[in-house]
Amino acid sequence: MNVPFQLSVIVPHLNEPEDLRRCLRSLNAQRESGISFEIIVVDNGSKEMPKAACSDVPDLRLEREMVPGPGPARNLGASVARAEVLAFIDSDCIAQPGWAHAIVALMTERPDIDLVGGDIGVLMVDPRRPSAIEAYESIYSYRARDYVERYGFAATGNMAVRAQVFRTVGPFGGIGTMEDTEWGQRATAQGKRIAFLPEARVLTPSCKTFAELACRWDRHVAHEFRKVSGSRTAMLGWLAGCTAVVVSPLAESFRILRTDRISGARNRLLALVCLTRIRLHRAWRMLDLALHGDAGRFVERWNREGA
């Protein structure tokens, strides 16, 4: 007999048991709002199954998907979910108060909405003195409203969709795709309606080192390169884009001055320094791929630890 859950929360996991424990603690706290939900943790091939992190959480099932990538892990979670609304959150995210309630309320009150993307913020070690990477990521790494309203997808670190809509659109792609972008744009191309839901907010830690941040961008750049490889015209556009990335910090300095995501001259300067450094790295990676190809060496890294 199925339990009448209002929400199924799906959490892919790979080798981050302490982050997962913190995520599950934040999800369990959502029960105070009176929303009934189940949690489905899908391990994606960790060295050790996160049984300890999951042991004290009610209405939780732990599954395992050995096909690499968060997309296949989420697909397995969706296939065993029992609620009519599916919510996806990453194992290093912390759901803020009211997260589950906001999702269920919107999906109940707005039957015309098929999927939603929530807000994503950076969890800072010391909010009074963020690091350069934290300041940068607060502005640039999680532009959740833009993803929804300008590009037609929701980041799967904080996304919800009706179960029937998910089945109609089909599964997430594998490790060779940017699965949230591809799935969301596939859904909206089919006429599914998407909305931004700022009340459903999560926080996620920033990259700890520049190497982690660079690795994330390497994967993104490699995915984009696969779209142009083999076309001379597209390759010329790629090289022009490389040049644009080099000079882009000049224009972006105005965004940093105006943003409300951070405050103070020190933090804005740190953000600009980190932005300049990562844009130069991206330009170098774009040139490297244009000269040598082999995007697969970057695409297959999906989590930070694996880098």
Image (cartoon, rainbow, N blue to C red):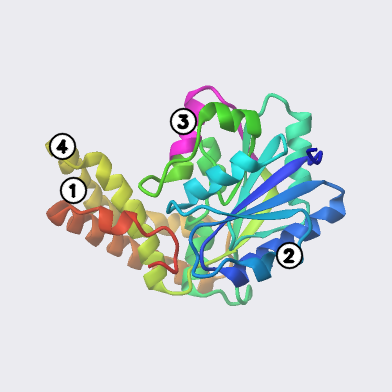
Distance from the alpha carbon under mark 4 to that under mark 3: 24 Å
**Residue 209 locus on image (x, y percent):** 43, 74
- Direction from residue 151 to residue 32 in the image, left or right: right
**Closest to the observer, 59 or 180:** 59
Q: Quadrant of residue 130?
A: bottom right
Q: Secondary structure at mark 1?
A: helix
Which tag, 1 or 2, sits closer to the chain's start? 2
In this view, the mark in front (1 or 2): 2
Distance from the alpha carbon under mark 2 to that under mark 4: 49 Å
Which tag, 4 or 1, sits closer to the chain's start? 4
Which tag, 2 or 4, sits closer to the chain's start? 2
What amino acid type is highlighted by mark number 2? Arg
Distance from the alpha carbon under mark 2 to that under mark 3: 33 Å
Read off the residue under disc 1: 239
Distance from the alpha carbon under mark 4 to that under mark 1: 12 Å
In this view, the mark in front (3 or 1): 3
Is 300 included in the stretch rendered in magenta? no
The residues colored magenta run 182-196
Q: Secondary structure at mark 4?
A: loop
Q: Which mark is residue 25?
A: 2
Q: Secondary structure at mark 3?
A: helix
Q: How many marks?
A: 4
Read off the residue under disc 4: 231
Is 183 included in the stretch rendered in magenta? yes
Q: Quadrant of the C terminus?
A: bottom left
Give the vertical position of 290 relative to 184 (above or below): below
Q: Residues within 10 Å of mark 2 (few under 14, many from 20)?
A: some
Read off the residue under disc 3: 186
What amino acid type is highlighted by mark number 1? Leu
